[in-house]
Amino acid sequence: AQKVTQAQTEISVVEKEDVTLDCVYETRDTTYYLFWYKQPPSGELVFLIRRNSFDEQNEISGRYSWNFQKSTSSFNFTITASQVVDSAVYFCALSEAKTGGFKTIFGAGTRLFVKA
Amino acid sequence: GAGVSQTPSNKVTEKGKYVELRCDPISGHTALYWYRQSLGQGPEFLIYFQGTGAADDSGLPNDRFFAVRPEGSVSTLKIQRTERGDSAVYLCASSSPPSGRGTGELFFGEGSRLTVL
């Protein structure tokens, strides 16, 4: 069965600190996709990144970086030099191929507070 | 429209009433998803459609919940005999057709906030 665990409920940092958001997933499939989404205070979920199970290359996009490790079933997200605008709830998600399409489930989210 | 549109944005109803929530996905997106999000929680999967058919409705909590997508675009989530526990934000998302690289990312609407008194 699919499962996504984000053990950190809330994290508070001071601006310019680095912060890592943890995500651990469970799946029986060999083909699956991992995502991170951001939900700012305005409420609308916004896609950040997708990774497929065959590509363990880490990725960097500006101040954001992602570390995918199949050996530990983890897909962690690091924000370098955090800014107040990074304050939001971040969700990790897992998508598996099912008959007729893909089913995506989400973790409970990590609320990040970045203080000036 | 350019994005996923959900109506109404807010709905207040009384316990026992019937409610319909509408989702208009991004044009060309064949997959459509419904999620429910309670305060402080992640989106909880309800159902998803691939075209007109419900590919997976395993997340619908009980038979009071039903969703349709008759023409493969607009979808309606229907809740009968509403209960106070149904109060939540109902999110709709759509995605582009699966490709060799798998599913596209989900594009979310702003949600319909349902309050059952």
Image (cartoon, helix red, strand yellow):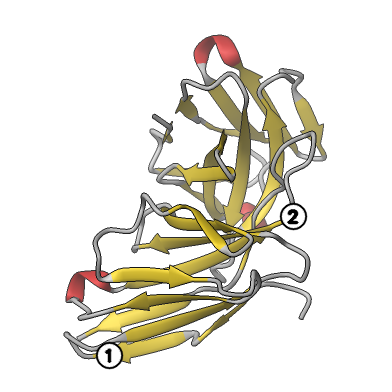
Q: Earlier in the sequence, mark 1 or mark 2?
A: 1
Q: Between residues B14 and A116, which one lies in front from this camera angle? A: B14
Residue drawn at point x = 20 percent, y = 69 percent: B85
Q: CA distance from mark 1 to mark 2?
A: 34 Å
Residue that appears at 59% across and 65% down:
B52
Q: What secondary structure is found at the residue carrying circle 1?
A: strand
Quarter where residue B116 is shown: bottom left
Q: Which residue is mark 2?
A: B96
Density class for disc 1 (Cα within 10 Å; few <14, some 14-19, many ≥20) is some
- Dot 1 corresponds to which residue? B13
Instruction: Report the amino acid beneath label 2.
Output: Ser
Q: What residue is drawn where x is 78% and y is 65%?
A: B28
Q: Is residue A18 visible?
A: no
Question: To which chain does the residue with label 2 belong?
Answer: B
| Residue B43 drawn at (x, y percent) | 44, 55
Of residues A34 and B49, the one drawn nearer to the viewer in this rendering? B49
Placement of A84 over or under B22, stated as above or below: above
Residue B76 picture location, percent across and down: 49, 77
Check if mark 1's residue and mark 2's residue have beta carbons within 8 Å: no
Q: SS for tag 2?
A: loop
Q: Specify the amino acid type for callout 1.
A: Thr
Image quarter in which the C terminus of chain A is found: bottom right
Q: Is residue B34 visible?
A: yes
